[in-house]
Image (cartoon, rainbow, N blue to C red):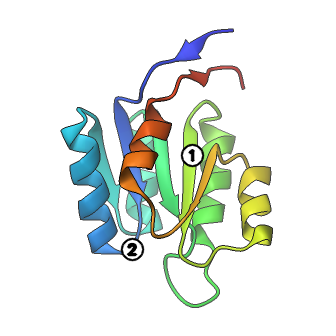
């Protein structure tokens, strides 16, 4: 079974500027090209323009009941099924976790995220079989 190497280009989608800055800095120091988006529209534009190995997406990006991240996850897996998606949320539950995995998430994390663990997880070999 073919194995994907460590990611070289990652899209981070989160409405929290601190998360975008912290994660993008950490990944760039690991030699990973990073593009960030704080809303769905710029994320969709980036997905149409570039090829990403991994997309890191926050589930709740606006409003109290928002689940834009799950919608983006579905969009990514429908259009780029080999792109791995990491879901993050500060409002986790077993239901949200199951929903994320059911829609095709490769990883699920509740904030705050241990950045070293996240980077280690991204560095693990990943099967390229869909």
Q: Which residue extends farthest top?
A: 1
Is 95 rendered above or below residue 83? below
Looking at the rendered structure, the secondary structure element under dot 2 is loop
Label 2 or label 1, whichever comes before in sequence order: 2
Spot occupied by residue 79 in the image (x, y as percentages of width and height): 62, 40
Q: Nearer the viewer, residue 77 or 41?
A: 77
**Residue at image coords 59%, 36%:** 80
Looking at the rendered structure, the secondary structure element under dot 1 is strand
Q: Is residue 46 visible?
A: no
Is 90 rendered above or below residue 86? below
For label 2, count other residues whose C-alpha is less than 10 Å away and answer few (under 14), some (14-19) or many (20+): some
Spot occupied by residue 17 in the image (x, y as percentages of width and height): 28, 72
Q: Nearer the viewer, residue 72 or 55?
A: 55
**Residue 83 occupies quadrant:** top right
Q: Nearer the viewer, residue 76 or 32?
A: 32
Residue 15, numbered circle = 2
**Residue at image coords 41%, 67%:** 14
Q: Is residue 91 visible?
A: yes
**Residue at image coords 68%, 53%:** 74
> Which residue in the structure is indicated by mark 1?
85
**Residue 27 occupies quadrant:** top left
Q: Nearer the viewer, residue 59 or 109?
A: 109
Marks 2/1: CA–CA distance:
17 Å
Quarter of the image where the N terminus is located: top right
Quarter of the image where the C terminus is located: top right
**Residue at image coords 60%, 79%:** 91
Spot occupied by residue 100 in the image (x, y as percentages of width and height): 71, 58
Residue 13 located left or right of residue 84? left
Is 88 rendered above or below residue 84? below
């Amino acid at each position: 079974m073919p194995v994907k190497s460590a990611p070289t280009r990652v899209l981070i989608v989160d409405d929290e500027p601190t998360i975008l800055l912290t994660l993008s800095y950490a990944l760039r120091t690991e030699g990973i090209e990073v593009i960030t988006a704080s809303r769905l529209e710029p994320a969709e534009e980036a997905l149409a323009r570039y090829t990403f190995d991994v997309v890191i997406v926050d589930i709740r990006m606006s409003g109290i009941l928002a689940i834009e991240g799950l919608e983006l996850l579905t969009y990514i897996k429908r259009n780029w099924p080999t792109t791995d998606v990491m879901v993050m949320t500060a409002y986790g539950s077993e239901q949200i976790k199951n929903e994320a995995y059911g829609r095709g998430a490769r990883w699920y994390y509740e904030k705050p995220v241990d950045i070293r663990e996240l980077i280690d997880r991204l560095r693990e070999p990943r099967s390229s079989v869909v």
